[in-house]
Amino acid sequence: MTRTKVLGALALIVLAAGTWLAWTAPPEAVQREYYRIINIHVPSAWLAFLAFGVTAAGSIGWRITRKRGWDRMAASSAEIGVMFIALALVTGMIWGRPVWGRFWDWQDARMATTALMFFVYLGYLGLRRATPDPIARADRASILGIVAVVQVPLVYFSVYMWRTLHQTPTIRPDGAQMHPQMLTAMLVNLAGFTLLYLALLSARMLLAKREDDLETAPQPVAGTSVARPSLES
Amino acid sequence: MSFWGQAATIARHELKVESRAGEAFTIVLPFGIVALMALPFALGADLPLISRVGPGVFWVITLVFGLQVALRPSSYREPAQRDLMALLGVDPAARYTGRCLGSGLLLAGVGAALALAMVVLYSPDPIDGWPVLVGVGLLFVTGLVQLGVLASDLTAGLRGRALLAPLLATPLAIPLLLGASQAQEELARGGVILPWVLLLVAADLILAVSGVLSARPLEEAAE
């Protein structure tokens, strides 16, 4: 619990600094103030990719070791990833309305494929919820968790393969194509979001452990009014 | 019996069951044709528009209704049959392959019938390289059937499976839809279709590896 609190407190501090930096950075030449939403949109999208990568890693870990901790990590990370990807989609749509003139533009392949990834992981969570047995749940979900992560490179490269309105990457190996102040704000926010992800993952895994303990604990037979049968000593 | 012998026996049995039940050709196919007919009612009598959207609508309808063919109940999913197959030493991967082969043949038939219906109902512009398009269609069917069987196995025996399996399979089938529909667009324009064919081949290979490797764990999870 201490680790979660420390990570949460750190996340709050870094996100507060990131918000201030995002607020004080200069406006963009064309988009003016609207560009500031990248300080939420880009870290959310990156963290969603990371979260789904962790889900795949947890799924592989479960398949190899059969230790419940890996499955809890996979499930917890998928839930947080779905939250982040929803945030990325919503902020993308909010930004799209004033800049593109519409909330949703089918010419943006990345937007469309990101929305699909959101539904794939909703299906993952639905599969977990529909499987009552914890071992069968981990087994089935781990297979989907490994297969589904193939979508991540598809989403990333969709803008190169297909059609796009989406910007090409602004942070490239040959240097960032951004004003240093804007870049600093975005990177600080990315760090804040990463800490927030770690805090949420830690808290959710703890909760999942407690859910598992509750699931495997001896249950009263026919309610509390009837005692469990036992041999006389 | 060899791996492929087991797979072929299961595929034959799948086709025999279908010949008796007739689900793919007497329920799914007519339903798909009704769906093909529904869209022009919504669009109105705009013939150039109907002609232009026809091929795209065909791929979507084949995806949605093709998944129903792949997801339909299989006699090999019942616990008693599964136990018997395990006792007989049938490889779970051969069972997966056999089901894919059987359902794939059915899906190819349903797809061909839907294509014919689309040509009749939508009168799309003729395409010169249609034999290439048949190959693209087969790659699409190969991926779709593997995805359907995988989703069917993932959700075997679960409550809400009828809704959950299509939810799992449909978003994952979009790369197949994209590959097939864009290949057709490029073919109509006289462009290069190789990137889209490679996307289809990559998706098929990933699904084949995933399906074969996950067959045994999924069988164990279903017990």
Image (tube, coloured by chain):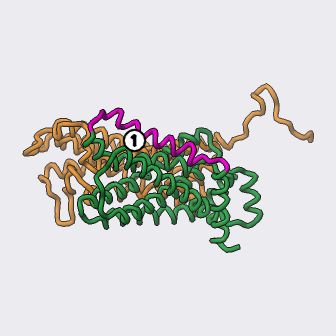
Chain colours: A orange, B green
Residue B89 sits above or below residue B144 on the image: below
Q: Position of residue A87 (x, y in %)?
A: 33, 40
Judge whether residue A37 can be spotted in this image: yes
Q: Is residue B2 magenta?
A: no
Measured from the top left, where is residue B57 in percent x and y?
A: 37, 46
Q: Main secondary structure of the magenta part?
A: helix
Q: In this rendering, would A143 be left or right of A30?
A: right
* Quarter of the image where the C terminus of chain A is located: top right
Label 1 CA crowd tier, 10 Å (few <14, some 14–19, many 20+): some
Residue with the mark numbered 1: A83
- The one nearer the camera, A152 or A37, is A152
Q: Amino acid at mark 1?
A: Met
Query: Which residue is outermost to the right?
Result: A232
Residue B217 rendering spot, x and y as whole percentages: 62, 59
Residue closer to the observer: B160 or B33: B33
Residue A196 rendering spot, x and y as whole percentages:
36, 45
Q: Is residue B77 found left or right of B114 in the rendered image? A: right
Assign a secondary structure to mark 1.
Answer: helix
Residue at (43%, 52%) from the top-left corner? Answer: B173
Please say if B161 is above or below A65: above
Q: In this view, which residue lies farthest toward the bottom?
A: B2
Q: Residue furthest left?
A: A29
Q: Which residues are magenta?
A: B20-46
Residue A1 visible somewhere in the drawing: no
Could you tell me which chain the residue with mark 1 belongs to? A
